Every structure is written in C-alpha cells, then in structure tokens.
Image (spheres, rainbow, N blue to C red):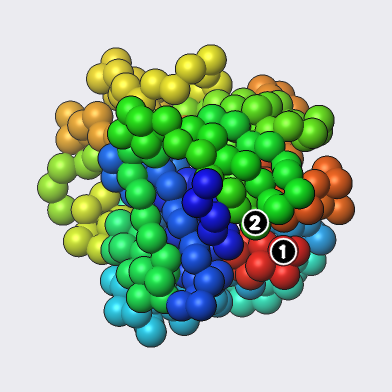
Amino acid sequence: MDSIDTLIIGAGVLGLACAARLARPQQSCLIVEAESLIGSHASSRNSEVIHAGLYYAPGSLKAELCREGRERLYAWCSQHRVAHRRIGKLLVAVSASERGRLEALAANAQACAVHDLEYIAPARLAALEPAVRGVAALLSPSTGIIDSHAYLQSLLAAAENQGAQLVLQTRVDRLEPGPDGWIVSGTSSGEAFQLRAQRVINAGGLFAQRLATHTQGLHDVPPLHLCRGRYFGYSGRAPFQHLIYPLPEANTSGLGIHATLDLGGQLRFGPDTEYLEHIDYRVDEQLREPFAKAIRRYFPGLDSTRLTPGYSGIRAKLAGPGEPAADFLIQTASDHGLPGLVNLFGIESPGLTASLAIAERVVREL
C-alpha cells in the first residue's frame, strides 16, 4: 500500500491553503478533489469579498480568524500578485429606527478588535454615494474584493512548488485509523484505491460531514444545513464606488442582499438565504421582483429590468433555520481522540477571508 505524509481532502480554498502552508519537498502531500476543477463549490460561488470582521461574536473563531486572515490575505495577494482592491464597504441604516442596530454593530466590531470603522452622517453619505438612501452609515475601509479564482490558483501553485500533488476526480469514501496512520479508501476516475496517510485534513466543505460519518471511531459529527444564496447581475454602469450593505438579517442566516462590485467594475446583488435538502445551484428568474424590493430599500433608483439571474452558492451551515449563527468548527484529536485527523466543519463566510489563518491553526493543531 502506498504511504504518504499528509492527505488533504478537498481542493477548495481551505484545502489549498492548508496545502500551501504544509507542503515541503522532504514530505509527501497529496490533495484529492472529487470534482474535475478546484474550488467548484463555495470557494468560487461567493461575493469575493475580503471581510473586515464586523459581525461575529467577540472571542469566536470567526471573529479571530477573520481579523487575522484578512491581514494574511492582503499580504498574500500583494506577494503573489493576486488581483484585489481595498474598495471599502458602507453599512447603511435606511431609517431612523435602524440607527440603534447600526450603533450596536459598531460596538460589536470594536469588541472584535476592528477599530477602523468610521461613522458617516447623512450629508457625507449622499456625497460618497448619491444613489444610496440612508440616514447614517458605517464605513469599513479595510473591506476589499478579490479575484477568488486567481487566489485558488496561487495557493495551488505555492503548494505544487513545494512538492504537493493534486489529483482531481478522486473521492475519499472511508477513513480507518491504523497503527501506522490512516487507511484511506476511495475511487479515482472510477478506479478503487487505498493508501496510508500519517495525517489527514478533511476540508471537504459541503461534503465534510459525509466523509466524517464514514470515519471509523469518529462519533461526534455535527449536523449539516445547506443554505443557498443566489445572486443577480446588474447590466450597465454601476452607480456605486463602494460595496453597499444593508443591516444584517435579524435571523443571522445572512448579511442581507447587498451590492458588490467585481474587479472589472461589474455590479451584482445578493445573496439571499434559502435552506435546502439537496445541493441545487439554480437561480429562478421569478426572484427578480423580491430582489428588487429588498434592494430598493437602500437603492431607490434601481431599474429592475437590468437585473439578470446570475449564479448561486451554498453555505455549509452548522445552524438551522431560526437558530443562532454557529461558529467555525476545527475538530482535532483533542475533540475526537483520533490522532492525525483534523475535520473542518461549517466553514461558511468569512471562510475565504479567514482561509490562511485557518490553515495556520490546522498546522498548529497537527
């Protein structure tokens, strides 16, 4: 049986970040991915926003790793020439009744050690973004945008330069602990395989729990809740210079249908939130008017005929509908008692922003 030092399951942003951090010429590192492309799910189906870390519970992994990951990510992008831009974000209160929530969010950001927020009065908001309606806003200058596909490629290149190997169309079906590491069973391009790995990182994203239930000796597997977020594009010239966010949804399942710009200046709106039983990436054109209604709260000049169905992504949530938001779960031997195994569960937003910090935490735990 072939033996390797490290097996990373999943070639999304988390798996590739771990590979870029762990790979060494003197140690074998194998990345396996069930799909035919890297980053086929959540890693390439998101808003491509580098988050500042405003929303999360103080002291949580999301708060800590978002803040650390943001700085690591900006440094990585500069070093590896990954296209990005510190465009800044405006978080808008559209009515007087929302001022209190805006102030509470500012206080939460302070508690999360995000100290660069700036309060924006109505007159300045109108000067900054004439198309936006609001009574007050918070400006987050450290929020940015990134080319997520270029970022994925840069992580893979860094890992491969250190000797890591990527194998696509390869699914791991079972993990069994043994005296000399982990026995790994699966299929690669339709052919069954087995190998032995000293260390295993389950970075399977939407499929991490599926593998965990087929990991011998692992009994603590959290529930997975699939939550779809859909996006609409907006044709023509964008009316904004910043990212525009309403206040987060009351049920904490999402941040509201916000306006984001890509690096080419193209405007899109989303995502919404919808819990699913199965993975489904369709975007129904009939959502145009519900989207338009939500967007007009802060952008009254919206022309709904310019909204076109875009794409969708699915969040791997640990909390179900109506439940408080759950934290990231980086499950290690101290949790499950199985040496050499790390499971990454519930790495939704801000997972892309936090990816390099998560990889650093995984390395430390291993």
Image quarter hosting the C terminus: bottom right
Secondary structure state at the residue bearing disc 1? loop
Q: Is residue 59 left or right of residue 177?
A: right
Q: Which residue is mark 1?
A: 366
Q: Which residue is mark 2?
A: 199
Which residue is at a point 26% across and 34% down the rendered structure image?
310
Which residue is at a point 40% across and 71% down the rendered structure image?
163
The reply to whether dot 1 and dot 2 touch (C-beta < 8 Å) is: yes
Tell me the amino acid under the disc marked 2. Arg
Q: Nearer the viewer, residue 255 or 63?
A: 63
Tell me the amino acid under the disc marked 1. Leu
CA–CA distance between discs 1 and 2?
A: 8 Å
Circle nearer the N terminus (1, 2): 2
Q: Is residue 366 left or right of residue 208?
A: right
The 10 Å Cα crowd at callout 2, few under 14, some 14 to 19, many 20 or more, is some
Q: Is residue 334 left or right of residue 283?
A: right
Secondary structure state at the residue bearing disc 2? strand
